[in-house]
Image (spheres, coloured by chain):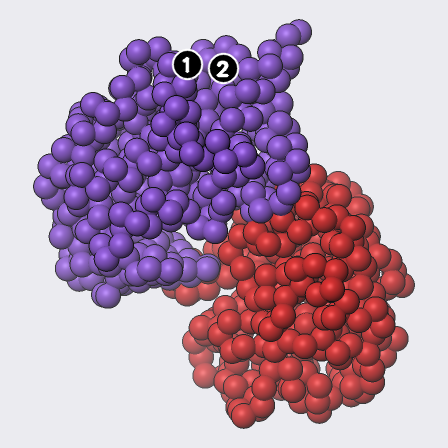
Chain colours: A purple, B red
């Protein structure tokens, strides 16, 4: 890894920006979402902002997660860090899926190394009424942070960020992260009326969170339904999709990326919920995912984050494979199949970005030539 | 839940046994594996022996997990407990996937609430040579336990138990349970020679463990590759399947069940590795799984264990759905999609068994009638 790559992040970032048009709405990322990217291949990483970056750890020192999300200056700085360092083709709004809940008054915390924790989980109607309000809270700190970011990012698009109702509900029902979502599913199956009321409230909060980001200047959005892959297609259709559809419908004026892990059986349904782009993890080649989705959807993904620790030539081969496989889709945004793991060496991500930018158009041109 | 159901477990067990032939090799379970079960539907549960049963907690008091697996009397008692209580159509050998490694001298422990933990994980060749021997250890305690069981079980078949090399390797490389298998995959992709050496040793130990159980009288086996679903089909084919194939080939004289979670993309490959029956989790209807597998394989599954906490009528509907969907497969063994969760109410499992026995043949007969 040459030192130059990490000592000149600003140059890299500027280079990437000049590759795109002056307006983020005609950026490579937005064009890929709209299925008109040509040979260009945008790249960004889920969780590019945050836990794997030393500059992030420095600015977060002594500041709790949810506090950091409520400080516009800090949100802007953390969101910009990976754009400066890597020259990625999009920024993703630094936040947490629980932020709109916290802003609405939900009593919860983010415990380091564990995740969102709720002291009194929702187990019945009284619990729901006690914990989750029907009205969104004040998100002026979001508006302010997005304003700062859009001014700074120029032509680089900002992707708005929110959690989907099913994934949010799983934390509120379990009380924290879960391996099997047993209480969540038991409530979902056992009391559909209470479940729908919970998810409607969460959809309102998430939709408002995304709408606020779009109104303030975000050029696209990504809805994270990280744990939807734990559901069968029948359960997803009956109990999760209708609520995600409501959230996505609230921001239909910008491209919408819809993401989950282990969602091979759900890809088509996640598209139909109102997405322009469907996230694909590493379990399925992008070409196969695109076949399942049909011509109306772009794909995003799908490098396995777990192989980032392998020797570089092997990582590079995987990157090239993903580019080749994604070329047959009507649109492809290069990304990982899930978030950047905390222990990732940022230099490896820098090399991935450089490789995608250097070789992506050539590989795509070869693949796109009949 | 009538009291009678839990106070007369012995009767239930005897009833179930008289449903099958006198010899476990012609039992309903074995016939389902061989795709000649007719309208009958065998049922058992992964992890039916163990953590969810009060009688298990009583006999395990003060005895460490790996110690309990090395005591033939205790292994036999724990294996028999769910057969007595539920009248299931098969016993599964009570053990742990790490038992053959421990017997071979691998320095590891099972930490309650966490799982297998290895103090000095395998990270390089020296680590491999230090940790994992090439020769199996003495498994006479297994032979003795199986002998006790076969004598006691009569016509009820005993399913032999072992972990697949990929899943075993993940514990040895990570040092314990993992969310993303990052070190495992980095080693697998980055040093295939070391990876194959590790998995060959693990295949030898697992094959010997299964062979010992079959030689002592087990009527079928199940190979647990619980975490294989974290791999793409390409990685599974290159790095996991060849080793599992070796294990399954060692016990080709009995029916072989091959199980993993989240393996929708791998079902065909798991069959081709040398299985008669492929385990299917709740993410795919059994009928669809069987279509992917083709006519040469039976299926096992696939009630979502997370819905066991829902009100009984809803659980019953799910059971009926799984029976209906499984009827189109050339063979169906009713089971959960993964292990019994620790907090499961045993009375619910008793009702599931009774429902499968009472309604299974009728639902299958309806579905099988052209």
Q: What residue is rendered at 70% in x and 59% in y?
A: B124
Residue B316 x, y percent position in the rendering: 48, 60
Is residue B288 at all visible to an observer of this figure?
Answer: no
Q: Secondary structure at mark 1?
A: helix
Give coordinates of residue A42: x percent, y percent.
45, 22
Residue marked by disc 1: A19
- Answer left or right for A280 relative to A85: right
* Chain assignment, label 1: A
Mark 2, secondary structure of its residue: loop
- Nearest the viewer among B67 and A26 is A26
Label 2: chain? A
Q: Which residue is mark 2?
A: A40
Q: Are marks 1 and 2 on the same chain?
A: yes
Residue mark closest to the camera, 1 vs 2: 1
The quadrant of the image that shows the C terminus of chain B is top right
Spot occupied by residue A281 in the image (x, y as percentages of width and height): 52, 38
User: Quadrant of the rendered structure where residue B160 is?
Assistant: bottom right
Q: Is residue A358 above or below residue B103?
A: above
In the figure, residue A254 lies in which quadrant?
A: top left
Q: Give the distance between the C-alpha atoms of the residues marked 1 and 2, in whole angstroms.
A: 10 Å
Residue at 72 percent of width and 49 percent of height:
B191
Q: Is B286 on the left or on the right of A271, as rendered?
A: right
Does residue B280 sit above or below A9 in this rendering?
below
Q: Position of residue B271 (x, y in %)?
A: 76, 48
User: Which of the marked residues, 1 or 2, is nearer the chain's N terminus?
Assistant: 1
* Residue placed most toward the observer, A8 or B242: A8
Q: How many marks?
A: 2
In the depicted structure, whether residue B161 falls above or below residue B321: below
Circles 1 and 2: CB atoms closer than 8 Å: yes
- Mark 1 neighbour density, 10 Å: few (under 14) some (14–19) many (20 or more): some
Q: Quadrant of the N terminus of chain B?
A: bottom left
């Amino acid at each position: 890894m040459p030192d130059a790559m990490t000592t000149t992040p600003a140059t890299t970032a500027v280079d990437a920006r000049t590759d795109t048009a002056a307006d983020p709405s005609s950026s490579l990322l937005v064009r890929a979402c709209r299925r008109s990217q040509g040979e260009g291949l945008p790249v960004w990483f889920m969780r590019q902002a945050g836990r794997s970056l030393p500059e992030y750890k420095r600015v977060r020192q002594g500041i709790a997660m949810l506090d950091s999300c409520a400080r516009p200056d800090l949100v802007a700085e953390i969101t910009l860090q990976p754009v400066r360092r890597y020259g990625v083709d999009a920024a993703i709004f630094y936040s947490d899926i629980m932020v709109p809940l916290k802003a609405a008054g939900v009593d919860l915390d983010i415990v380091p190394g564990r995740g969102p924790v709720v002291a009194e989980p929702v187990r019945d109607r009284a619990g729901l009424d006690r914990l989750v309000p029907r009205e969104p809270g004040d998100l002026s700190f979001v508006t302010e942070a997005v304003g700062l970011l859009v001014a700074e990012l120029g032509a680089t698009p900002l992707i708005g960020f929110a959690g989907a109702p099913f994934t949010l509900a799983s934390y509120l029902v379990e009380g924290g992260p879960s391996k099997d979502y047993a209480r969540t599913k038991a409530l979902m199956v056992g009391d559909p009326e209470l479940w729908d009321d919970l998810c409607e409230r969460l959809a309102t909060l998430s939709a408002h969170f995304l709408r606020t980001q779009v109104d303030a200047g975000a050029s696209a959005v990504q809805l994270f339904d990280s744990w939807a892959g734990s559901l069968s297609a029948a359960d997803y259709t009956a109990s999760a999709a209708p609520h995600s559809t409501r959230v996505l419908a609230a921001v239909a004026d910008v491209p919408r990326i819809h993401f989950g892990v282990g969602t091979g059986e759900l890809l088509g349904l996640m598209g139909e919920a109102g997405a322009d782009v469907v996230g694909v993890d590493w379990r399925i080649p992008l070409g196969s995912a695109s076949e399942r989705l049909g011509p109306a959807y772009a794909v995003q993904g799908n490098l396995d984050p777990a192989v980032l620790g392998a020797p570089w030539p092997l990582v590079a081969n995987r990157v090239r494979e993903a580019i080749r496989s994604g070329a047959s889709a009507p649109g492809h945004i290069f990304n990982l199949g899930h978030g950047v793991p905390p222990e990732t060496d940022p230099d490896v991500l820098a090399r991935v970005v450089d490789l995608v930018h250097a070789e992506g158009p050539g590989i795509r041109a070869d693949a796109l030539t009949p």
